[in-house]
Image: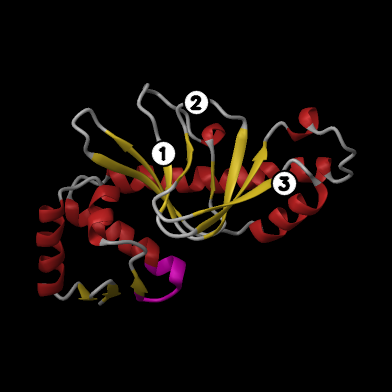
Amino acid sequence: MKKYFDVDNFVTKLQKTCHLSIVKEFQADEVITTFLLRRNQFCVLLEGEAQLVTYDKEGNRKIIYFYRKNDTFGEALFKIYTDREYFVIAKKKCKVLFYPYDVVENCTRTCTHHLEILRDLPNLILHSIAEQNFRMLLLSNKTVREKLLTYFNNLSIESNSKTFELPFSLTDLSDYLMIERTAMMRELKRLKDEKIIKKVKNTITIL
């Protein structure tokens, strides 16, 4: 989803004015945080890529969200309806900002810009809501073709181009769209044969 709120400015302001914000680095495949235990924090992905994943009873992985630079995540933004744990896992080296959403109550210093920060929080939260709304729209499509084309059209809008790079592997894409990889590969071939898309490795062009 396109972002219209200046997340970079918000993060810079937060780091300068609140000592409770913490930046941590993670290597690929490291767990950044989990959503089973309630933690009163927001997180902003400053660098790298990450995924929110869970596993069903048979051990099959499901990718719930794919996070890129400036995306926001945290337990406060994702209501848990089961006792199954959710993991935010780094796909590559990541830098993440952690900060508590009840900053005023927990801050022992005089952070003069706290009220301004709190005024900006709703805009930051709206980004997460917009992403979740798109996810719901994406998964509401009934066919593999509809899911693929909806996702491709969104990537095209984000990049402002008919040609764009898939942000992750085809295996991850099938998990993200919650479809079988073999069914997805068949549909991708049909889309190419019908000249609806052109695919060269991970580069897609909508024709």
Label 2's element?
loop
Can you tell which mark lies on residue 198?
A: none
| Element class at badge 1 | strand
70, 36: nearer the viewer: 36
Counting every numbered tag in the picture gives: 3
- Side (left or right) of 202 relative to 184: right
Query: What residue is shown with label 1?
Result: 87
Quarter of the image for residue 119 reads top right
Determine which of the numbered discs, if any, sits on residue 120 in the image.
3
Which numbered disc, 2 or 1, marks the residue that appears first in the sequence? Answer: 2
- Residue at x 53% of width, y 45% of height: 128
Q: Is residue 162 magenta?
A: yes
Q: Residue at x 23, y 56 (%)?
A: 171
- Residue under label 2: 37
Amino acid at pointer 1: Phe
Whichever of labels 1 and 3 marks the residue nearer the N terminus, that label is: 1
Please tell me whether residue 205 belongs to the stretch shown in magenta.
no
Task: Point out residue 109 in the picture as x, y percentages from the top left corner.
Answer: 87, 37
Label 2, label 1: how many angstroms apart (C-alpha)?
A: 11 Å
Q: CA distance from mark 1 to mark 3?
A: 27 Å
Mark 1 or 3, which is nearer the eye? 1
- C-alpha separation, residue under disc 3 versus residue under disc 2: 26 Å
In the rendered view, tell whether residue 72 sits above or below residue 159.
above
Q: Is residue 153 left or right of residue 174?
A: right
Provide residue 103's location: percent of width, then percent of height.
75, 35
Image coords of residue 62 (percent x, y):
28, 41
Label 2 neighbourhood size at 10 Å, few (<14), some (14-19), many (20+)?
few
From this view, report whether residue 135 is shown above or below residue 93. Answer: above
Q: Residues within 10 Å of mark 1 (few under 14, many from 20)?
A: many
